[in-house]
Image: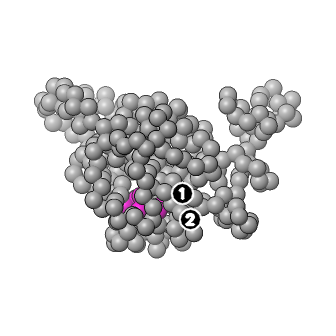
């Protein structure tokens, strides 16, 4: 993936959408989106259980009778942690989905490396702890097999991903597994400087077409069910998918993380130019 033409084109045209500030000694030259200790005020938001009470704004409480948190942006070194969902569902529907996932992972790792960072790429499959690649071992992505049967939620509960504090975390998954979006996103964002949430689907997952009677097999659990895939079923599926995406977007906003859904068949070049730039995840050089 390091030498993939689309990846090379992307890293020559775009950079990671993090705010730049003058270099400040050991802390680096990027601003995160977490609650930090720098003096640059970011915004207010309503207090939620678990927030640091040291950031409560008592004058705002006196004015509005609401507990409000003052958010600041902290300076961070450009450490990037990229999590890719290596479960079997990421390989469904042909090669588009798995290819774009690998391209995205390589692209973000190389962009981070250009900033002087040491990106860590975590392979979220069934191994405990998860395997991680460095920028030097990035070519191992080329032969990565998507064989996992678990999900990101289970890995986080098990503490299998060794996140470091104040990192920029990029998570790439279809998120098509049972989970509570609020809980999952909060765990992914915990003690990070920034979190980017990327849902990657194939065209059929985003917009399925009628297939008639089919026996459906869950590639991760082996469970089977017979179903007539008609317009009514498709409409029910689309409504559930929309609810999931709305919940993920809402949970991401609560931790100040961009959320975007990408359709793999559109290709990396178009996804960078439109979706990722519009989400603020990338910006043109």
Say how the picture is coloured: one colour
Q: What residue do we see at 53% from left, 32% from top? A: 182
Q: Position of residue 137 (x, y in %)?
A: 40, 64
Q: Is residue 14 above or below residue 157?
A: below
Magenta stretch containing residue 101, yes or no? no
Q: Is residue 246 in view from this perspective?
A: no
Q: Look at the picture and state if 151 lies above or below 18.
A: above
Question: What residue sits right under mark 2 in the picture?
Answer: 117
Q: From the image, tell me which residue sits under label 1.
A: 80
Residue sitting at the far front: 128
Looking at the rendered image, the quarter that the N terminus falls into is: bottom left
State the image quarter where residue 76 is shown. Answer: bottom right
Q: Quadrant of the C terminus?
A: bottom right
Q: Residue at x 77, y 28 (%)?
A: 66
- Looking at the rendering, the stretch of residues picked out in magenta corresponds to 103-109
Residue at image position (77%, 53%) is: 38
Residue 34 spot, x, y in % from top left: 66, 47
Badge 1: residue crowd in 10 Å (few <14, some 14–19, many ≥20) = many
| Residue 120, placed above or below residue 200 | below
Q: Secondary structure at mark 2?
A: loop
Residue 273 location (% of width, % of height): 44, 63
């Amino acid at each position: 993936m390091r030498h993939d033409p689309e990846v090379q084109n992307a890293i020559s045209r775009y950079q990671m959408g993090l705010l730049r500030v003058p270099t400040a000694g050991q802390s680096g030259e990027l601003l995160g989106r977490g609650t930090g200790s720098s003096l640059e005020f970011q915004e207010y938001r309503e207090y939620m259980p678990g927030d640091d009470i040291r950031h409560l704004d008592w004058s705002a409480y006196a004015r509005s009778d609401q507990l409000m948190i003052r958010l600041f942006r902290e300076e961070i070194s450009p450490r990037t942690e990229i999590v890719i969902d290596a479960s079997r569902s990421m390989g469904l529907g042909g090669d588009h989905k798995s290819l774009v996932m690998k391209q995205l992972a390589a692209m973000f790792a190389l962009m981070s490396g250009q900033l002087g960072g040491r990106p860590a790429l975590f392979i979220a499959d069934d191994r405990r702890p998860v395997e991680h690649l460095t920028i030097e071992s990035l070519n191992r992505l080329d032969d990565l097999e998507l064989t996992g049967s678990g999900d990101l939620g289970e890995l986080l509960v098990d503490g299998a991903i060794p996140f470091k504090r104040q990192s920029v975390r990029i998570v790439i998954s279809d998120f098509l597994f049972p989970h509570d979006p609020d809980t999952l996103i909060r765990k992914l964002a915990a003690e990070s400087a920034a979190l980017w949430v990327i849902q990657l689907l194939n065209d059929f997952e985003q917009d399925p077409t009628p297939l008639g009677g089919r026996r459906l097999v869950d590639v991760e659990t082996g469970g089977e069910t017979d179903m007539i895939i008609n317009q009514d079923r498709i409409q029910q599926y689309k409504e559930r998918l929309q609810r999931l995406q709305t919940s993920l977007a809402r949970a991401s906003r609560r931790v100040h993380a961009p959320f975007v859904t990408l359709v793999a068949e559109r290709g990396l070049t178009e996804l960078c130019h439109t979706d990722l730039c519009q989400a603020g995840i990338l910006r043109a050089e």
